[in-house]
Image (spheres, rainbow, N blue to C red):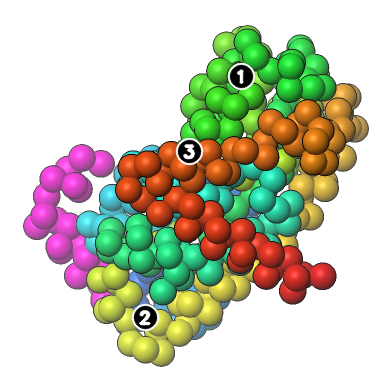
């Protein structure tokens, strides 16, 4: 994908085509070029991008969809949005930590167990006027539209049962990076960042002892085949992945088109989070039915697990405060937004 980034002329030419329609298409519908690192079968694709694509098409857009990393890896996709080659793509703090360090607030442990609470709370911070929008996305020329976020990450291991925090030091655990690195450091386990798709092979070859992953992700990656044990209720964190549009692409739309895009994004946000909540329960059942031993975790104040994870958010915030970023303010606002949305969910 390097030739895209290195050619301003090509990028400008493609940017001009983003909403101009396709010469090969008989319609004059504006075109949205949506690139994704996830496949159409992944929950993010099946319930998120698919929902957006359908709603956008019903509103008169033509959607050119490039799933499963066809246009590059997650780092490439965010760059291609900025270059105008893609209209919409994911921009994940876990993969772009140097650009969006504050946005990994969504990845901290024990913030909420409800995917819709997490998604709606994060969108409060990511939408125009929100602290994450103002601090990180707006300066990068990006506008978050919806977010794919899965809470309830658990520790799955191949051969060593994790029942207390004392079982973690010395283990090599696959992590998705971002705020998880702060969390894993607190546990004493060694975190190794790698794509989720590489986890099966790494666990089967004992390259890693286990992984941090939500129950729903164990199904497509067949981790029941390489996992003997899993925690249940640890909620060690989440991974939030905003889908973004460049300001240039947004500004090229009419007010009516902007409203249609935002409505499609809002629908994707809600449909996806509701599906993720359902899939979480199905994933737990899947693991149990396939012989994985589940170890319930006590997170009450004063418990061993509670004492381990409770300081992590403040530690994360302080590390950002120390380099001049508003980590504590972002954490405070996210916690407040979660409390507000948990109230509306009841």
Q: Quadrant of residue 164?
A: top right
Give the structural element (helix, strand or loop) at label 1. Answer: loop
- In this orientation, does residue 141 appear? yes
Verify CB contact (< 8 Å) between mark 2 and mark 1.
no
Q: State the residue in front, 69 or 328.
A: 328
| Residue at the disc numbered 1 | 188
- Front label number (3 vs 1): 1
Q: In the image shown, does 322 or 152 lie closer to the viewer? A: 322
First-in-chain label (3 vs 1): 3
Q: In the rendering, at what x and y percent does residue 273 appear?
A: 67, 60
Picture residue at 40% right of the left edge, 46% below the top? 321
Q: Is residue 9 magenta?
A: yes
Q: Is residue 217 visible?
A: no
Residue depicted at 74% across the width and 74% down the height: 344
Determine crowd level at label 1: few under 14, some 14-19, many 20+ residues with C-alpha closer than 10 A: some
The label shown at residue 29 is: 2
Magenta part of the protein: which range? 1-25
Q: Characterize the magenta stretch by its predominant secondary structure.
A: helix
């Amino acid at each position: 994908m390097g030739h895209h980034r290195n050619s301003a002329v090509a990028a400008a030419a493609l940017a001009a085509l983003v909403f101009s329609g396709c010469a090969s298409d008989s319609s004059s519908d504006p075109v949205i070029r949506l690139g994704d690192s996830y496949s159409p079968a992944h929950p993010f694709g099946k319930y998120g991008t698919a929902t957006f694509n359908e709603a956008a098409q019903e509103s008169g857009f033509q959607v050119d969809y490039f799933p499963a990393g066809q246009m590059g890896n997650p780092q490439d996709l965010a760059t291609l949005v900025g270059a105008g080659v893609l209209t919409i793509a994911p921009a994940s703090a876990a993969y772009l930590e140097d650009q969006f360090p504050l946005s990994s607030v969504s990845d901290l442990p024990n913030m909420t167990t409800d995917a819709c609470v997490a998604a709606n709370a994060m969108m409060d911070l990511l939408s125009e006027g929100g602290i994450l929008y103002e601090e990180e996305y707006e300066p990068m020329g990006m506008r978050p539209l919806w977010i794919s976020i899965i809470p309830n990450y658990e520790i799955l291991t191949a051969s060593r049962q994790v029942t207390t925090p004392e079982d973690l030091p010395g283990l090599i655990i696959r992590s998705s990076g971002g705020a998880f690195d702060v969390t894993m450091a607190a546990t004493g386990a060694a975190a190794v960042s790698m794509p989720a798709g590489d986890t099966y092979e790494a666990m089967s070859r004992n390259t890693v002892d286990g992984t941090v992953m939500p129950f729903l992700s164990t199904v497509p990656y067949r981790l029941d085949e390489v996992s003997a044990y899993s925690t249940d209720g640890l909620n060690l964190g989440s991974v939030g992945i905003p889908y973004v549009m460049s300001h240039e692409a947004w500004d090229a739309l009419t007010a009516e088109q902007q409203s249609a895009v935002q409505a499609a994004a809002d629908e994707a946000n809600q449909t996806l989070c509701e599906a993720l909540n359902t899939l979480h329960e199905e994933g737990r059942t899947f693991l149990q039915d396939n012989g994985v031993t589940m170890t319930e975790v006590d997170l009450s104040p004063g418990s061993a697990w509670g004492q381990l994870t409770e300081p992590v958010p403040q530690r994360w915030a302080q590390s950002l405060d120390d380099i001049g970023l508003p980590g504590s303010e972002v954490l405070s606002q996210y916690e407040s937004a979660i409390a507000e949305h948990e109230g509306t969910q009841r």
